[in-house]
Image (cartoon, grey):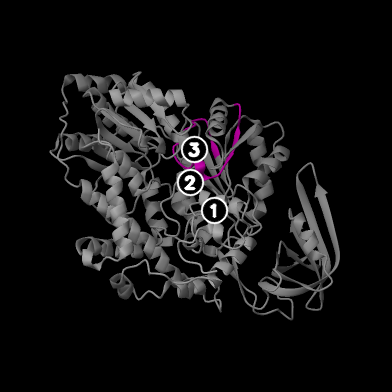
Amino acid sequence: MTIRRDTPVEELRGIGPGYGAVLRHRGIASAGDLLLHFPDSYLDLSRVEPDLIPGQDRLYAFRVRRVRLRRNFSRRSSLLSAEGEAAGQALRLVFFNQPYLQKNLISVAPVHVYGRVEEHGGRWQMVNPLLVPEGTAGGILPRYRPLGTLKGGRLRSIIAAALAGWVDDEDPLPEAVRNRHAFPAVGETLRAIHQPGSLELERIECLKERFIYDELLCFQLELQFVRDAFRNRRRTRRYHFGDPVRGAIDKRLPFRLSAEQEAAFSDIVNDLKAGCTMQRLLQGEVGSGKTIVAFLALLLASENGFQGAFLAPTAILARQHYDNARAFFGDERLALLTGATPPETRRQVLAGLARGDLSLVFGTHALIGEQVAFRDLALVVIDEQHRFGVAQRAALYFKSRAADLLVTTATPIPRTMLLTLYSDLAVSTLKRPLPGRQPVATRVITAGDREKFYRRLKSELEQGRKGYVILPLIEPSEQYPEMRSLREEEALNRARYPGIAQASLSGRSTPGHKERALRRFVAGDVRLLLATTVVEVGIDVPDATFMVIENADRYGLAQLHQLRGRIGRGSVRSTCFLLESPRPTENGRRRLRAVAAHGDGFRIAEMDLQLRGGGLVAGLEQAGEIDFRLADPRKDLRLLQEAQVDARRLLEHPELQNPRVRGFLRGLKAKIRKLSFS
């Protein structure tokens, strides 16, 4: 079968309707999309070791003598062991919570195992080694992270079959761009990444740059095209800043703004007085009070008789901002619109926005829908804006003929990235936490001290404290046995902390479940909230005083700092515990030491840019709003800057565009043309 870039995934060998739905749910609709699901790692299986080499990952031929499986049903755990020999010496294999491997070990012929031999109790042992798939010993084995129910081994065979039938069609990159960067052909590059003949990791990473750059070029084309569409739009609404407005502000502010907040709000007021519409980025350190500045901007719109919209990345965050806004504005003309809004309520909200009965609306992607129309939308606030695609941001912005735009982020952005991503936005910065906010102590816990730490945490829970446990995975992973998962920890914590109520949250949780779990946590009915990074932004629970981050060495610096920002919001001193993986890398240890030593998010952001080795390694089963499949703007800043230059050149010289770029730009133009203006 001939496989092309646009071949639907359902037509690939090994994928039926069920797996097709799993892939499409993750944005993988075609063979081209699937082949961009690159291996997470590679195993060098080209040599079977004739001697045991302790302390190093190696491939051995293992002859099984005896297999034993023990289960602990109360703890939902199992221990599978196999006695046998490798390289002429007695060896024991131990597998935790992998009972399904028992059938693979019952074999007359030797099985190939890959892992680390270590001495334990005077004998050689391997813990959780990889059972090498039949027929792969002797080469390089690519390893893929699972996609839902589609496991890594199945993906490997599907991708191999797709590559066998792959036919290069037209290259997605324009010829001028390809020549400038000396990029090889698509098919040749894909085969070298998925099926390398030798384990040359540096070369493989260089080959990936071709596809990372392609993604960044599309991003920059979209970004610059949209910018050009609304740059220098003339102001059509005049704001009044007289005594009634000042009185409304004083009435709602029972405290004085910090000097930085006053300066940021003054920037916004000056923008609203200018002849062109506002386009401003408000970036703030965790706990610096950027939300209240955004609320004051919305208050100006409301007091002048205009409408405002507040777009948040998650339903939890949208609900939280809505609840806080109701208390702040003391106004019934507010609404919340998310995917979970009941149909009747949704109809009422849409009608109220269209008539102008509602002055402010808070919501998620639901605000972007074509049915949402405003009578007089004057101000758009986009919170945690880095989580939204450019077209998504523009879709809300273009619901008005000349709206003012305020985008906010609690993720400090290094200056070099600001110049690349937000060169046409004015920037206001809040660097200092608000007075009264407690500094968060940060402690690194080694794998050897884990059990001792659990006993200490149990004592603190029994004294009434509450907090978060952050896990990198939702489900256990065969590929990452050292990574802890939400499902496993739920069961283990019931035994560790008997009588302590717990709840869990992840990107797969329904909106109703998320809301119930968070409400119970806020009320104190739940004192241990297990979660993935879905709680990274916006969750505000003042009496949560600790956070435990499992496998913390697998996260980026900025993400660790953001997670840590969920605590330290009350009057009691809080602590963030960073738990190491059993075998952390030196880079991982360095990141943990840096987070423990620094509390300044802007300093951490600069360090993250220098140390970046990708973000979370294995927590990619977590659903979230991300703009990129392959690229990481921090890690790939050089490529991003080159794409910025190339995108400007392609837009200014249409003769350099190829059919794919021209079609992409036509699609953007059509999106903008179809947007309903109020």
Residue at disc 3, secondary structure? loop
Residue at disc 1, secondary structure? helix
Per the rendered image, the range of residues in magenta is: 525-546
3 vs 1, front mark: 1
Instruction: Identify the residue shown where x is 28% and y is 19%.
Output: 251
Q: Position of residue 85 (x, y in %)?
A: 82, 73
Disc 1: which residue: 23
Q: How many marks?
A: 3
Residue at disc 2, secondary structure? loop
Q: Position of residue 368 (x, y in %)?
A: 36, 38
Disc 3: which residue: 567
Instruction: Identify the residue shown where x is 32% and y is 42%.
Output: 395
CB contact under 8 Å: marks 3 and 2: no
Relative to the observer, which residue lies in front, 532 or 18? Answer: 18
How far is disc 3 from disc 2 in space, using C-alphas?
22 Å
Indicate which disc, 2 or 1, sits on the residue closer to the N terminus.
1
Give the amino acid type for the residue marked by disc 2 in the picture: Gly
Disc 2: which residue: 624
Instruction: Identify the residue shown where x is 37% and y is 56%.
Output: 606
Give the amino acid type for the residue marked by disc 1 in the picture: Leu
